[in-house]
Image (spheres, rainbow, N blue to C red):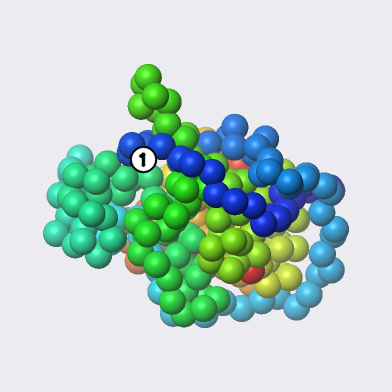
Amino acid sequence: MTQFVQRTAGTQPAEAPRKETKSVDSTASYTLAEPGGAVRPARRRPRHQEQQMPDHLPTVTQFASPDLIHAIVYGGRDQGDDPRWPESGAPDADTYRRWCGHMCGFACLRMALLARTGTAPTLFELLDGARRYGAYTEDEDTGTIRGMIYAPAAVYAATELGLQADVHPELSMPDLLDLLDAGRLVMASVHKEIRRPDRPAPGKGGHLVLVTHRQGDTLHFRNPSGDSDRTRTARLHTATFAGFFAGRGMSLD
């Protein structure tokens, strides 16, 4: 199956609005092309020996206090009521409150950097950098935010963070496995309820997880909004994962 990859040729950052925004994993983003870039068919990667990513790799959550996630996502707790919010790098508590529910992509990006280099900026430093490249947009009239927009986010990751980042607007499960076997980390678009895999998937896409490796038909991934240790450092059979997977994402190396 052919997959299409947005290559991250070097570009200059675009001006981005500085007002806060709200939205994650915008489907429309996959049609954007960065200046000077081109969409072309990706070469099929050879299948290598399955890559192993240690399960002790730090798990980064989009909420500063992992033990509060269940109360936030299912118990109605104010997501800004988090005593550890300064650890996110947010300039103040109100900014943290507005953004923390929409930081899954940056949590994935931060984990990828920790896996590859051992160091990473804070979530809000990553957010500020990505916004300079237009990875979030905001409607001036309504304040509606669209993002993370993959193409400019990938350019930011390549230009500023030194990661090879490819956008995959069409990503089948076999192609995802090929990327993992080639040693790539994959930010995959899934439904947020993947943290409850024993229930029918209510949809696909809208949330990002970092798929780190596989063992046979079992995918290992980190979920920035997992509400328990087991769902933050998670593993699922490919067939179960596919029920939540939107068939798009971004691979990193």
The one nearer the camera, 128 or 146, is 128
Looking at the picture, how far across and down is residue 112, in whole percent? 52, 68
**In the rendered image, which quarter contains the C terminus?**
bottom right
Q: Is residue 155 above or below residue 200?
A: below
Q: Which residue is mark 1?
A: 18
Instruction: Determine the residue located farthest toward the top in the rendered image.
Output: 141
Looking at the picture, how far across and down is residue 147, in whole percent? 48, 40
On the question of residue 70 being in view, the answer is no
Q: Secondary structure at mark 1?
A: loop
Q: Is residue 165 left or right of residue 106?
A: right
Q: Is residue 55 left or right of residue 180?
A: left
Number of marks: 1
Indicate the quadrant where residue 82 lies: bottom left
Indicate the quadrant where residue 75 lies: top left
Dot 1 crowding, Cα within 10 Å, few <14, some 14–19, many 20+: few
On the question of residue 56 being in view, the answer is yes
Looking at the picture, how far across and down is residue 42, in whole percent? 82, 54
Image point 71% across, 63% down: which residue?
A: 179
Image point 82% across, 47% down: which residue?
A: 40
The one nearer the camera, 218 or 29, is 29
The one nearer the camera, 26 or 75, is 26
Tell me which amino acid carries mark 1: Arg
Image point 42% across, 31% down: which residue?
A: 138
Image point 26% across, 55% down: which residue?
A: 90
Looking at the picture, how far across and down is residue 9, in whole percent? 71, 55
Q: Is residue 15 above or below residue 241?
A: above
